[in-house]
Amino acid sequence: MRKSLKKRLGIVVVAVVMGLSTSAAIALAFNDILPIESITDFLGASLGFSIMYLGLGELLEYQLPPSKQPQGE
């Protein structure tokens, strides 16, 4: 139980960091295409990207079957 909780917390932390960095990159590089004009726009974009990354992390960690380990010689 505790190990699973730590794993989920790690996924959440990584998703939030990736969401913040993606929003910052979009604000700096693609401001003409997707303008982020205020802090609320930035936080909304960060939340949206964090939710997408969180869903992807949960899918990759818990829904896909585990990969098979290569057999040694």
Image (cartoon, rainbow, N blue to C red):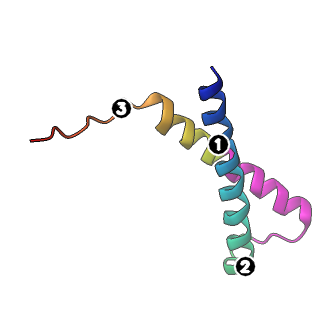
As helix, strand or loop, the secondary structure at mark 3 comes to: loop
**For the N terminus, which image quadrant?**
top right
As helix, strand or loop, the secondary structure at mark 2 comes to: helix
CB under 8 Å between callouts 1 and 2?
A: no
Q: Is residue 11 magenta?
A: no
36 lies left or right of 32: right
The structure residue drawn at horizontal position 46% and vertical position 29%, both measured from the top left corner, is 63
**Residue tagged 3:** 66
Foreground residue among 30 and 11 = 11
* Amino acid beneath label 2: Leu
* Amino acid beneath label 3: Pro
**Residue tagged 2:** 28
- Of marks 1 and 3, which one's residue comes earlier in the chain? 1
Range of residues picked out in magenta: 35-51
Q: Is residue 40 above or below residue 8?
A: below
Residue 6 spot, x, y in % from top left = 65, 34
- Furthest toward the left, the residue is 73
Q: Is residue 43 above or below residue 54?
A: below
Q: Nearer the viewer, mark 1 or mark 2?
A: 1
**Residue tagged 1:** 10
Residue 35 spot, x, y in % from top left = 78, 72
Q: Image quarter for residue 36?
A: bottom right
* Amino acid beneath label 1: Gly
